[in-house]
Image: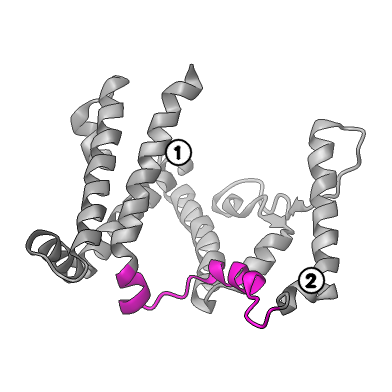
Amino acid sequence: QTFLIWTPYIFLLYWLLLWCAALISYRWEQEERLLFPMMQIPLEVADTSDGKPSAIMKSKLMWGFFALTSAVYTLNFLSAYFPDVPAVPLSSNLGRMAHGGPLSAFNWIRLDFRPEMIGISYLLASEVGFSLVFFYFLRRVIIMLRIFYGLPTAHSTFLQFQAGGGFIVLGFALLWAARGYLKGCARQAVRGGPEANFYRLCFFGIVTGFGGVVGWCWAVGISVKWATVQF
């Protein structure tokens, strides 16, 4: 029963996201010139332009580390279900650095070894890689300041609200930056143009997806107003 209830919601949500991405894809590709680094590996693997397997598929070094990483994760997966199987520890922490006070915010800093994240980091822009580290420690500094000033709200609650506010601001900023592009899409969809049918299909998908998600929320007892604001 749970599966039958949630499946329509997941389908409608992905339907909505699909058409939103399709509508904005031209701006991402041609105007903002996004690199889509996560697509580089699949494209490299699938490259058979000379009629032969790609160079990465013939690399002994790649296959060696792929086998090593797969073996480690397979052991850890089996160990989670069968405790007799030995696991390879990939996580640790720096332990307790302070027994109280603001510096306790830096207790138990995690040290994880994740081969897949090391690989992904090579595909990221240096600014993005730096941000991942910088904002992790900035979060710790914020917690330290909250402890120093004795703020009563739970740290996790504050950080969730902070992240939610950041996503809202980012969403409005992206829409504002793309306002001219979106106006052009709407104009073509209404008045016609070289890509009119595509934009009409995108707007149809967005409207039906949004309406379907709100309708699902209404059906399970969620306020229509809250669902409209939320999505």
Measured as percent of width and height from the top left, residue 61 is found at: 83, 74
Q: Secondary structure at mark 1?
A: loop
Precedes in sequence: disc 2 or disc 1: 2
Quadrant of the frame with the C terminus: top left
Relative side of 194 to 90, left or right: left
Which residues lie in the magenta part? 26-51
| Amino acid type for the residue under numbered disc 2 | Met
Q: Position of residue 221 (x, y in %)?
A: 28, 19
Q: Main secondary structure of the magenta part?
A: helix
Q: Residue furthest top?
A: 1
Q: Is residue 114 left or right of residue 199?
A: right
Q: Is residue 186 left or right of residue 109?
A: left
In this picture, residue 70 sits left or right of residue 200: right
Please tell me which residue lies in front, 155 or 33. Answer: 33
* Residue found at x 73% / y 55%: 94
Q: Return the x and y of residue 117 as percentages of the image width and height.
A: 65, 62
Residue 73: in sight, yes or no?
A: yes
Q: Quadrant of residue 69?
A: bottom right
In this figure, which residue is indicated by the disc labeled 2? 62
Asked if one can make out residue 170 in the rendered structure from this viewpoint, the answer is no
Residue at 85% in and 49% down: 88
Position of residue 173 relative to residue 219, above or below, is: below
SS under mark 2 = helix
Q: Give the label on residue 154, or none.
A: 1
Name which residue lies at 65% across and 51% down.
107
**Do labels 2 and 1 touch, CB within 8 Å?**
no
| Callout 1 crowding tier (Cα within 10 Å): few <14, some 14–19, many ≥20 | few
